Structures are given as structure tokens and as C-alpha cells.
Image (spheres, rainbow, N blue to C red):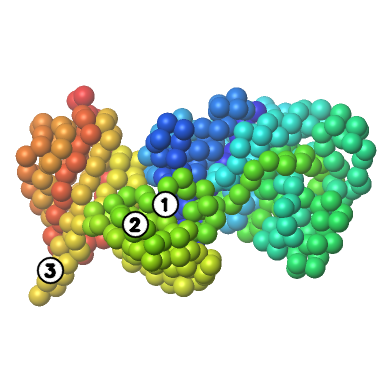
Amino acid sequence: MQLVLLSGGSGKRLWPLSNNARSKQFLALLEKEDGGMESMVQRVVRQARAAQLTNDITLATNASQLDIITNQLGDTVSVVTEPERRDTFPAIALAASYLKFTKGCNDDEVVVIMPCDPYTEAGYFHTIAKMVQCVERNVADLVLMGITPTYPSVKYGYVVPAAQVSGDKFQSSGYLKVSRFTEKPSVEVAKALLKQHALWNGGVFAFRLDYMMSTVKKYIQSESFEDTRARYQEFPKISFDYEVAEKAESVAVVPFTGQWKDLGTWNTLTDELHHPIIGNAIMGTHCENTHVINELQHSIYVDGLKNVIVAACPDGILVCSKEHSEEIKKAVENLTPRLMYEERRWGTYRVLDDSTYEGGQHSLTKSITLNPGKNISYQIHHHRSEVWTFVEGKGIFVLNGVEQRVTAGDTVIIPAEHYHAIKALSKLTFIEVQSGNRLVEEDIEKFEWNWSE
């Protein structure tokens, strides 16, 4: 069985911690049993493996998230990047092509599609196992997970069963045939749907690989993943629900009744945080239902606040009542400042200072940390020079083809138009000061380098 996790989103609803490069699923705010912290995507991958669902996991995502996925999950998962955002059907079609042509999966391989960020329990993955069994038994071409509703929500789509069956019969089959779908209804319609025993559409689908590939071939006839990806724009920009699920002639649903949440707003996320403070902060005794998350080195003190979220990071500071936290996305959707913190495939960087001086000269100061064994590519900049001061660890530095060892206390100068790279032998941190008149991430040209060790 192949599990495909869909990872998208622009990350505005949990601003300022989330942004276009670090969407909500990558925020390491959830506490594990051992006291460590993990992100939503790390939690889902861990849960899937703990349930012994499968070790064959592929993330379908956009190219901007590749580095952070690599940083958080390493090489334990496969990653398929879409060349542009075109909704869930093209993303799933591309992932299916990857499984078919690159991984060499058989046509009858069962594929499960699910979001990468539900906050759920082990029973969720046991329900997925039941969905796989339904596909293997040819119960239906397409099998969905239906979340048992807790209220008449207008945020979710609904799956309406064809008919109710007796308890004994359902227990023996474990599934229901599907009559129709209803997308995000009004409250009145939602109430009527609940009386019909409708279920929320949880965005989890199971099917055989050839079922999806037959739909792919309606738009792109190809014999390679590379060709499919190169012609990605030929897929219609449409959701999987509209293009596949609602057109399917044979559909079944397996209900799930356990814990399931979308931690998509500060209000819902803070409900699942074990501690009111994460980071460098102090809370007085007169706060009620207030959470503080601080990624800055500066201390934060709060008191006398009720039902408030305070979030601070290099990209901004938020002080907002939880009641109005869902309005954040609209308020900040036009903010496009320089990203002040990013996770990359090799580690992380944080911007410490961004200044412009008289005459147009510009400087940018970063703290950069490489994980052991990772490297920044052999590269050249045309519009800036750099000075690196190493403050932690050991590494190998390359300048114009010559390698040298570096350690804490060393400083190197990299003029513009000079080739350079760095590899961490241990956790390696250095302060980078860029100088020039065009300090942008795009000022980079990469080349191959064969490391001596």
C-alpha cells in the first residue's frame, strides 16, 4: 500500500509563525510523549508508522516546501513537487504518475491519499486500513473516509450514504455505499444532512493505482513521470472531489468516529497545546485562557489577558483575541516582507539585521546553522560579497576550488564572483554578513562539487 500525503497551503492563518515557506503543518508546536516537540507533518508520519500502516510514504507538495520537508523528515519519505499550484486533482495525478513510472508500482497497488496535517488518533489510521481492505475486496472503485460530525458545520463537505443498514450488517461490512456529495452547505442544509446520517468528507481517499491513472490519461498520455511533470499545466485546475469523487460511479465510505481536528487557526491550535507558554516568556497570575509563543530572543511578559494569543517571531508579532483569530488571514494576505526565518534542506537561517545605508549600500546579517553532514551548494553571487564568522562546530569550507577546515572562531571573506561552499562535520553555526546593492535570495548560481569527505 502506498500512502500519499498532500502538503500545500500558503500559511497565513497562523501568522506570523507561518508564511509561504513555513506553512502550519511545519510548526513544531505539538508535544510528544517524551517531552520533545514536533510539527503536524512529523506527527502524522510518526502515527502512520506506529500504526504499521505502511513505510511507503510520499509527500505531494509545491517546490517551495521541499527544503523544509527534507529538513524535518530527511530521506524517510519520497517527495513529489508540482511545478505550479493547480489544486488537489493535478497534485494527486502527478503523485500517481510518480508511483507508476518512478517507483514502478503495479496497476493494482492500493493508494491512499490524505492531508498531511490532521490532528487525530491511532483509530484514524486503523480506519484507513479498513479502507484499504475495502479496495482490495473490490467493494468500490473509490473508498472515502467519513468523519462523524459533531455539529452542523458549514466549513466541510458532506458525504451522504445511499441508505442506512442494520447495525449487525454494518459491523460485518464496515462500510456504506455513497449516494451523493454536498459541498460546504448552509447551516440549515447541514442540519438536514445530519438527519440523513451524512458524514464530513475528511479528504481521505483509497483506490487502485490504475483507477487514477485512467483519469490521468484523459489529459496527458505519457510513459514517464518527467514528461507528465513537464506538461503539468495541461491538467485542469480543479479539486479531486469535483474531478474524480463526484463523477465516480462506484463509491463507498468508511466512517471514523474518533478524535479529528483541523488545527488551522490559533483558536483551535491552542486548544491542543499542553503548556500556555512556548519560548522565552513570563505570564502573570491574572491571565486566563491565554497562550504565548515566542521564537524571539527578547523576553515577553504578559498579564491581565483573557482569551488572547500572543505570537512573536522574526517575521512579526501578533496580539489577538482568540475569538477573532480567524480574521488574521484576510488582514495579512497582502504582506510580502522578506522572510526572516526559514528551514532549508541543510538546516535553518534567521535574519538578525537588514539595513540600508546612505548611498544605497545594503547589508544583511544572518545566523545560519547546518545540520551534521549537510552542506550548502557550491555557488557564486554576482551582486554581493559575504563575510562568515564561525561560532559553533566544525566544517569544510571551499573557496574557488580549494578546501580548508574551519572551526569556531574562524572568519572567511567571500568577494562577489567567487565560488564557495560549506559542509558541516558537526552541527555548524556561523554569522553571515552580506554587503552589496542587490541582496536577494535569487542572486545565486549553483554548481556541482565533489567533497573530499
Q: Are marks 3 and 1 in contact (CB under 8 Å)?
A: no
Q: Earlier in the sequence, mark 2 or mark 1?
A: 1
Of the pair 232 and 353, the residue shown nearer to us: 353
> Label 2 to label 1, Cα distance in Å?
9 Å
Dot 1 crowding, Cα within 10 Å, few <14, some 14–19, many 20+: some
Residue annotated with mark 2: 283
Q: Amino acid at mark 1?
A: Pro
Q: Is residue 204 shown left or right of residue 47?
A: right
Depth check, mark 3 against mark 1: the one in front is 1
Q: Earlier in the sequence, mark 2 or mark 3?
A: 2
Task: Write the residue at 44% across / 40% down.
Answer: 31
Measured along the vertical axis of the image, is residue 88 above or below residue 392? below
Q: Are marks 2 and 3 in contact (CB under 8 Å)?
A: no
Q: Amino acid at mark 3?
A: Gln
Residue annotated with mark 1: 276
Q: Amino acid at mark 2?
A: Met
Question: Could you tell me which secondary element the residue under label 1 belongs to?
Answer: loop
Of the pair 93 and 232, the residue shown nearer to us: 93
Task: Write the residue at 19% across / 61% down.
Answer: 353
Dot 3 crowding, Cα within 10 Å, few <14, some 14–19, many 20+: few
